[in-house]
Image (spheres, rainbow, N blue to C red):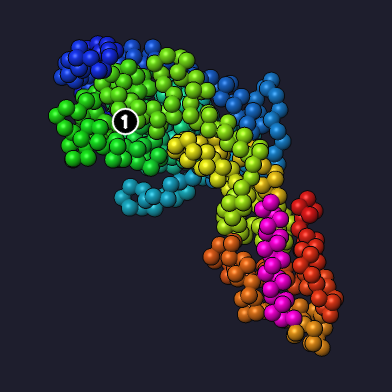
Amino acid sequence: MVFIVAASAAIEVEACTPNSSEALGALIEAQQHLEWYGADDKDIQKAQCLGQQTFKDEELLYYFKQKYQVEAPQVPQAPTVKKLSKEINGVQFVDEHPQMLSLFKKLSKQNPMKCAYGVMCPQRHYSVSPACTKVVCAMEEIFGQGVGVRLLYLLDRYGFNGSHHVYVESAPWTAEELDVALAALGDLPDFLLPQNENKKFTHYLRGEGEERTVGNATISIFDRWNQKSAQGKKYTIVHELGHYLASAMDGLDKTPEWLSFSGWDKGTSHALAVFPSDYAKTNADEDFAESVVTYRYNPLRLQVFSPEKYAYIKKHLFAGLEYINEKQCEKTQSMVYQAEQAVLAKEKRHFDQQYALNSFQECSSLLINLFVDGDSTAKAQQCVKRIHFAASIKSVADEKQLRPQLLKKFQNQEAEKFVSTKSTQYVYDQVLHLIADSIEKLLQEKKEYIILSNKSKEARCEAITGRYVYQSAKEALAVFGENSYYQQREKLNSIAQKVCAEWELNDWPTKEEVVASLKKLLPQELQ
C-alpha cells in the first residue's frame, strides 16, 4: 500500500492490435522495459476530461453559498433552512446552517485515539475573534487564510477530513497543496466520491516518516510528495484513492476475477502476467491501484497491456466511462448515469410493497411515534423515503449489474426529491392497519372483561393494556422487526388506551371504527 519512488526507464508504448503477432511482440518488449509508473507528466497533462485544476477562494465560497446560504457577495439566495446558534469547541456561532456546524465539528473534534506516549487527547478549544461567528470565518482563523475553506470543501464535497487537529501525526496543509489534491479528486468521475462522510486525508508530520515514502492508503501524504511535480502529486493521490475505492467497493482488488488476471490467486504473479507499470508487480493491491491510475491518465497503455484489467476497471469502478477521447468520458456514457435515470423513472411510476416491509423494519420506532408524538412526522417521512429510494436503487443496480456503492452520492442527494408520494402514503396506511389489527386482537381477547366489568371506562381501558396482556399483538406487529414489540410496548399500550377511550365499550367497535380512531392520533397532514 505504500507508494515509493524508484528510477524509471522512459519508453514510448504505442497502441496496437492486441491479437496480432506484432502486437504480442511489442507487448513482450514493453513489459521487459516497464516504467516504474503507468503514466508520466506528459500523459497526465494531455489526459482527457480533466476536472477543475485551479481553485479560488471566491469560487469555494460560492459553492457553500449555493448549498448552505453562507455569506458571499452577488450570488442567488439558497433555499431557507432553520439556522442555529451554538458553541462548538470554544467557538460561538450565530445563525449558522446546521450542516456547516456539522462540518466544523468534524474538522475540530479531537480523534478519540490516544495521543503519543499513551496519553488520551484532551478536546481542543479554539480561540477566534468575537466577530467571527460563522464557520468559514472560524475555519480561516484556525487553519489559515485559504486553507480553512478548502478543508471544508474537501470534507463536504468528497468526504475527506484533512484536519491536523483531528488526527495525530499530521501536519497543517497549505492552500497550494490542497489545490493539487482537489484537482486530483476532480479528475475522477463525479459519482465515485464521497464513499464515507469523514475519511482521513492528511499530510504526515513534516521532516518525519520514511524517506522513500510518498503516500499510503490510509490516506497520508509525506514530504517526498512535495518534491514531485504537480502531475506527479496527482498521480500519487489517484493511486492511493485506487486502494481506498477498492476497499469501499467490497474489495475490488481481492475478487477471484481480479486475482486471476496476473496469477495473484496462486500467491504470486505468473511468468506471462502483464502489468501497467513496474510498481504494479509488487502485489495484487498495487497492481489494482496502478491499473486505476493508468486507466485514468494513460488508458491506451492499460488497454494494450492488459485488456482484461482494463475491462474490469471500466465496468466495476468507472461504470463504463473511458478516457481515450472526450466523447467516451461524457457522463451520459456512464452506466451510473443510465441507472440514475432508470431509478427516477421507476420512482415516478411505480411502488413496491417490499419497500413498505423494509420501511417497517428500519423505521419502526419513528412510525409508531406518529401516533404518539406529531413532531416525529418529518423524521418518519425522511426515514421512509430513504429506505424506499435505497430499495429502488438496489433493484436497478442489480438489474444493470452495477455496484450500489457507485450510486451512493446520487442516493444521498436525490432521495428527498424523487421518492414516490404514493409509496410513502402506502407505508402510512399499512402501519395504520397493522396497529389497528393489534388493538383489535387485544380487545377481542379481553372482550368479555370489557363488557361485563363494573369498573369505569378509564379503568377498563387501562387494564386491557397492562404489561402482560398485549401478547396477542406481537404477531401483528412482527413486521416491524423482531425486537420492535418489546421496545415499543409502552407506546403501543398508550395508543390502545387512547383509542379505547373513544368508544362506548358496550357498543363493540368494528375494524373501520378502530382505524378511524387511530387516524385521529396521526398528525393532521397524514390523516
Judge from the rendering whether residue 83 lies leftward or rightward of residue 138; answer left or right. right
Judge from the rendering whether residue 454 lies leftward or rightward of residue 216; answer left or right. right
Judge from the rendering whether residue 53 lies leftward or rightward of residue 366; answer left or right. left
Residue 503 image point, x, y percent = 83, 73
**Predominant secondary structure, magenta span:** helix
Residue at image mark 1? 289
Residue 443 part of the magenta-drawn span: yes
Q: Secondary structure at mark 1?
A: helix
To which quarter of the image does residue 450 belong? Answer: bottom right
In magenta, the rendered stretch is 426-447
Residue 382 image point, x, y percent = 64, 47
To which quarter of the image does residue 265 belong? Answer: top left
Inspect this view and state whether residue 466 appears.
yes
At a point 30% along the width and 28% down the height, the residue shown is: 309
Quadrant including the C terminus: bottom right
To which quarter of the image does residue 472 belong? Answer: bottom right
At a point 41% along the width and 21% down the height, the residue shown is: 322
Quadrant including the N terminus: top left
At a point 53% along the width and 65% down the height, the residue shown is: 482
Amino acid type of the residue tagged 1 in the rendering: Ala
Most foreground residue, 189 or 84: 189
Residue 357 image point, x, y percent = 59, 55
**115, above or below 155, in the image:** below
At a point 40% along the width and 39% down the height, the residue shown is: 249
Residue 413 image point, x, y percent = 58, 36
**467, above or below 522, in the image:** below
Residue 255 part of the magenta-drawn span: no
Q: Residues within 10 Å of mark 1 (few under 14, many from 20)?
A: many
Report how many numbered discs are placed on residues in the image: 1
**392, above or below 326, in the image:** below
